[in-house]
Image (tube, grey):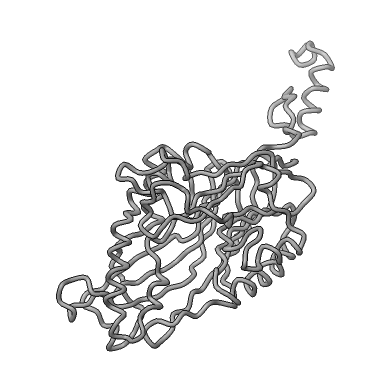
């Protein structure tokens, strides 16, 4: 009698059952997890390093280099490599599944300047790559975050006087991005990286600079909890704030729910800009009031980000709004607004504080 026959029919039934059900291991009683998942999310404007709207003070082309030179000096003084360490500390402490980043800046230079001869946007020498710097700071802390989506927004170049010789000019190029970072264990797909049709035009030295804005979107899966995550930086100037908000809500209609929209939206409760009301009227709920009873103020420090305290904060514009029946905000906090959050040289991590909210999402 063979061993198989000797062991009887129960072994045959067990083998047949395992084969039929294609189980990963025979006798494995493990089931897929059920129930809700608590998912922490962050939105963070990381600050381009200077108030570029000061360029509007230039009434002629000849005035542009001096102002541009002052602005680039401020970018250097606000020291993104140092501030990036503080931002990475925030991410390490809160461990968000996804991070929506705004004002992710890439500064490039070209010397000597050729701006007045051809006006091309062609500087290629990297000066500050904010995304690369932040990713390295995260890696240094043993954190695994990847770029899940990235949209290129404005891309402008101007001549700057960086030396005592007013005729010795360097072209400074600023390229702006919005970025979604995803933690290593978070699955993302169906990326969208899109610019708004409407944009703001700002007069600079007798000409104009276009401030292009956009948004990024991913389908996210966090331990079985699936949702759409959208990150944007709306224009603060009118009518672009209003026009971009209408564009955004129209586009979001085509994405699956539940959906969470995060970003520096340059609007908020009681704001003079209408985007908050437009998004709310489209059926989105502001997550902060349900997550935290505090004011949630997030803006803004001064240009040099060396304020002695947060007394200048008077707006809540770094927002999370959501739509869908299978999720609810359960806790929230503001980050980057405590004196202990400053860098060793006394810089705040950004001119904004960040918003962190945990949602309970059904699988």
Q: In which quarter of the image is the C terminus?
A: top right
> Which residue corresponds to the image point at 76% horizontal and 34% vertical from the top-left?
35
**Residue found 45% across the figure and 40% down from its top:** 143
Q: Camera-side residue: 48 or 122?
A: 48
- Could you tell me residue 193's position as x and y percent? 57, 65
Q: Position of residue 225 (x, y in %)?
A: 70, 43
Relative side of 321 to 84, left or right: right
Query: At x 27% / y 71%, what residue is drawn?
Result: 69
Task: Please give left or right for residue 101 compared with residue 249 in the image.
Answer: left
Residue closest to the far left: 165
Q: Where is residue 50 in the image (x, y as percent from the top left)?
A: 37, 63
Q: Is residue 357 above or below residue 219?
A: above
The quadrant where residue 257 appears = bottom right
- Answer above or below: position of 363 versus 304: above
- Asked if residue 277 lies left or right of residue 209, the reply is right
| Percent x, y of residue 138 | 41, 44
In this view, the residue in front, 91 or 11, is 91
Q: In which quarter of the image is the N terminus?
A: top right
């Amino acid at each position: 009698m063979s061993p198989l026959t000797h062991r009887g029919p129960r072994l045959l039934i067990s083998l047949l059952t395992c084969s039929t059900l294609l189980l990963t291991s025979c006798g494995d009683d493990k089931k897929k997890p059920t129930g809700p998942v608590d998912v922490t999310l962050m939105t963070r404007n990381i600050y381009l390093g200077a108030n570029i709207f000061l360029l509007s003070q230039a009434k002629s082309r000849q005035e542009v280099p001096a102002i541009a030179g002052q602005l680039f000096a401020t970018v250097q003084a606000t020291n993104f490599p140092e501030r990036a360490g503080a931002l990475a500390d925030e991410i390490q402490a809160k461990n968000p599944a996804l991070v929506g980043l705004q004002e992710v800046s890439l500064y490039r230079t070209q010397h000597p300047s050729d701006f007045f001869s051809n006006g091309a946007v062609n500087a290629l020498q990297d000066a500050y790559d904010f995304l690369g710097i932040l990713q390295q700071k995260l890696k240094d802390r043993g954190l695994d975050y990847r770029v899940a989506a990235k949209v290129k927004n404005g891309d402008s170049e101007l001549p700057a006087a960086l030396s005592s010789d007013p005729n010795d000019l360097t072209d400074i190029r600023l390229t702006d991005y919005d970025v979604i970072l995803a933690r290593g264990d978070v699955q993302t797909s169906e990326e969208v990286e899109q610019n708004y049709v409407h944009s703001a035009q700002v007069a600079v030295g007798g000409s104009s600079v276009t401030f292009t804005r956009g948004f990024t979107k991913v389908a996210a899966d966090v331990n079985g909890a699936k949702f759409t995550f959208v990150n944007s930086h709306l224009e603060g100037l009118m009518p672009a704030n209003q026009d971009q908000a209408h564009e955004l809500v129209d586009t979001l209609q085509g994405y699956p729910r539940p959906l969470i929209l995060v970003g520096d939206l340059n609007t908020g409760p009681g704001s003079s800009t209408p985007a908050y009301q437009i998004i709310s009227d489209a059926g989105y709920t502001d997550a902060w009031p349900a997550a935290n009873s505090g004011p949630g103020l997030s803006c803004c420090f001064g240009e040099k980000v060396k304020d002695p305290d947060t007394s200048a904060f008077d707006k809540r514009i770094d927002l999370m709004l959501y739509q869908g029946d299978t999720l609810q905000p359960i806790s929230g906090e503001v980050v980057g607004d405590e004196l202990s959050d400053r860098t060793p040289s006394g810089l705040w991590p950004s001119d904004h504080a960040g918003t962190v909210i945990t949602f309970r999402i059904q699988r």
